[in-house]
């Protein structure tokens, strides 16, 4: 199978998986709408908090209300997209620990991709939609900025998925990495949702290495404000590098996996 055929095959696979997952959640439309709307309402409460805070302080670390709302919009949509397309990124460790990986090893598609894409998170739709709603209210919106935002939502979603999956893959080596995985997820979200300047300079290197919040929120903000198209390829290169590193860690850990000897099937 040549490279183009391989890419086309996996693109169709992801499209089919997404369609099946969406049909599954839409069987319970009321539950879907409640969870999605509830997540948007939860995010809106934080927007109200920031609005009141900045109105009284005049800005935080050089960030105005529009800057912070852009960060919230981008992080929300990126986080949502990661969990819509790859709903098992936070369950990978549990699946490995319980020996449930056997079901995916029997499938013809790549184990890593098949495992992550086999589920979608309903509430993540609320996160994803909320970001685009907020974007519509930001000043200076244009087709160019919408294209930049959409591109960074995709790259940010890949970085979120890769980082979370890598943390969960540590289960292969530690037996249980749930504590580390939860901590990384919480820290990554916290660092991404607050102005970079409120953190000490000595720890900002973390934003561009272990917890790549800088490439999810801060660099995209600079590109969005300055319409600096030249910086976009850099962010995508970084995103693909994190995906490659996460995939390599999973494959390395897979060599240590011991079958749970479970009998089952995925339909």
Image: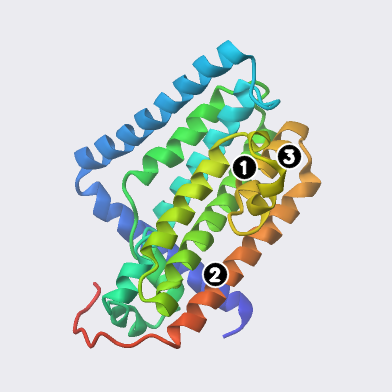
Disc 1: which residue: 217
Q: Residue at x 28, y 39 (%)?
A: 35
Along the line of sight, the residue nearer the viewer: 94 or 28: 94
Look at the image and tell me whether residue 81 can be seen: yes
Q: Which mark is residue 87?
A: none
Q: Is residue 237 above or below residue 33?
A: below
- Which of marks 3 and 1 precedes in the sequence? 1
Q: CA distance from mark 1 to mark 3?
A: 10 Å
Q: Is residue 205 above or below residue 2?
A: above
Q: CA distance from mark 1 to mark 2?
A: 20 Å
Dot 1 crowding, Cα within 10 Å, few <14, some 14–19, many 20+: many
Q: Nearer the viewer, mark 3 or mark 2?
A: 2
Quadrant location of the N terminus in the rendered image: bottom right
Q: Residue at x 61, y 53 (%)?
A: 212
Disc 2: which residue: 246
Marks 1,3: beta carbons within 8 A: no
């Amino acid at each position: 199978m040549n490279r183009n055929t391989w890419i086309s095959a996996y693109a169709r696979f992801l499209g089919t998986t997404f369609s099946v997952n969406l049909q599954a959640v839409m069987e319970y439309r009321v539950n879907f709408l409640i969870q999605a709307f509830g997540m948007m309402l939860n995010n809106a409460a934080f927007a109200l908090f920031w609005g009141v805070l900045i109105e009284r302080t005049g800005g935080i670390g050089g960030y105005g209300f529009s800057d912070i709302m852009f960060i919230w919009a981008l992080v929300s949509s990126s986080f949502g997209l990661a969990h819509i397309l790859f709903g098992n990124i936070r369950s990978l460790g549990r699946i490995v620990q319980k020996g449930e990986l056997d079901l995916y090893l029997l499938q013809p598609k790549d184990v890593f991709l098949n495992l992550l894409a086999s589920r979608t998170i309903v509430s993540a739709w609320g996160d994803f939609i909320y970001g685009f709603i907020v974007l519509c209210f930001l000043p200076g919106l244009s087709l160019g900025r919408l294209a930049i935002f959409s591109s960074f939502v995709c790259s940010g979603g890949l970085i979120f998925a890769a980082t979370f999956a890598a943390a969960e893959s540590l289960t292969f080596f530690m037996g249980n990495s749930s504590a580390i995985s939860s901590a990384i997820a919480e820290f990554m979200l916290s660092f991404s949702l607050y102005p970079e300047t409120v953190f000490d300079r000595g720890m900002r290197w973390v934003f561009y290495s272990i917890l790549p919040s800088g490439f999810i929120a801060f660099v995209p903000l600079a590109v969005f404000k300055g319409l600096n198209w030249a910086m976009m390829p850099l962010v995508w290169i970084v995103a693909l590098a994190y995906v490659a590193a996460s995939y390599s860690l999973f494959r390395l850990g897979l060599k240590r996996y011991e079958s749970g000897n479970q009998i089952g099937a995925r339909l």
